[in-house]
Image: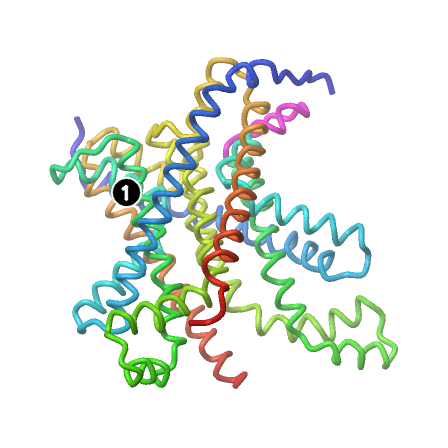
Amino acid sequence: MTYVFQFGDVFNSWDELALGAWLTIRLSALSMVIGLVVAILCALGKTSGPKPVRWIVGAYVEAIRNTPFLIQLFMVFFGLPALGLRLDADTAALLAMVINVGAYATEIVRAGIENITRGQIEAGRALGLKPLQVFRHIVLMPAIQTVYPALTSQFILIMLNSSVCSAIAADELTAAANDIQSRSFRSFEVYFVVTGIYLVMSLAFSTVFAVIERTFLSRGRG
Amino acid sequence: MRSFGPNELLFILAAARWTIALSLIAFLGGAVGGLAVALARTGRVAALRYLSIGYIKLFQGTPLLMQLFLAFFGPNILGFSVDPWAAAALGLTLNASAFLGEIWRGCIEAVPEGQREAARALGLRYFALMRLIVLPQALKIALPPTVGFLVQLIKATSLASIIGFVELTRAAQVINNATFRPFLIFSIVALIYFLMCWPLSLYSQRMEKKLSAAAR
């Protein structure tokens, strides 16, 4: 083996990598938050909405879960302008990520909501809670508590999947890596380092999720 | 500029076979690797156990796209040059091994401990015990999540287009560059993926319901 590893070019471009990683973090965090809101609304629609709403949510979830994220990204970035909606790469990436994570999270939240027994909701009503209070304290929070592990691993998956957004030249971490690679030709070194950065970010996200669980979700039930 | 006609549609449809071929290769390779990972992960040799935990964490904690890039550029360092086809097959196989290994670990652990104790009491050694007692029972539980993972894998092959392998997604990009009908073309391709994945998803869900009803 005569190959000599040269990481110099990679580490010299640390500022580019840092900027890329920061956008990856922002895109991921935003898509998680917005995706969760989408998921809660869709799960509510699917469990207790009228029939057409249930059907539409079902179609949305199945369509997204059975097609590749890359194609969804292309539809948003290249397809939507044909319908008159032109987005820049970063916005298109965010929108595609929200649509994607929203569908997966809908199924997860729905499973949590269906786990809540009818009796608990009736008990809540009998105690004089208003419908919104019943929804918040008796349906939503316990549901999220139960499915929290599945939800957070889905969130980490979308963070990892955001690397695909480099295909439409959103300026996230993988795109930064591609830039450095095309300047320095140190392909293996660049992607090796960036893979390490992703690994650290996924560990960091799981740590944050664990902290959130300890702080907000495990304070006794109800 | 070319217009989108039957020839273009045929080109895309023909490329779907590469998506299917890549999915099958990665699935078969991943099944062999996954079984090894699952056995190492549930076995008694501590070193193998930690090694397989590390392997799973590494592949589940990094993007598949990075794994494909490294599979593409890595062999060059060792003096082999690989084409996108081999790199995609290698990257997806390694990735599938980690995910299937983790799925099957759960299935192996779900087989009650008493079964193993009884088998050991009958004098079965490790491989006979696994082959005759544990794996057949684990297989039944493993079917729905394994089919579910196959759906993930089919979708994941679309990333091979980024390292330049001409499968369904890459074919769509090629045709789109020539005809510039993005909405139409990517809708058709999304539909083709959907038709490949949805039956498998439905089958997996139905099997899972059956199993959980039987467990009650």
Task: Report the span colored magenta.
Answer: B73-84
Is B41 on the left or on the right of B81, as rendered? Answer: right
Residue A11 image-quadrant placement: top right
The foreground one among B216 and A209 is A209
Q: Which image quadrant is residue A8 in?
A: top right
Residue at the image point whose x is 39% and y is 77% from the top: A116
Q: Secondary structure at mark 1?
A: helix
Q: Position of residue A97 (x, y in %)?
A: 34, 44
Quick check: is B76 in the magenta stretch? yes
Label 1 chain ID:
A
Q: Image point 72% across, 16% down: which residue? A: A2
Q: Quadrant of residue A164?
A: top left
In the foreground, A125 or A115 = A125
The image shows a total of numbered marks equal to 1
Residue A196 in the image, given as x and y percentages of width and height: 58, 33
Q: Which residue is mark 1?
A: A95
Front residue of A162/A141: it is: A141
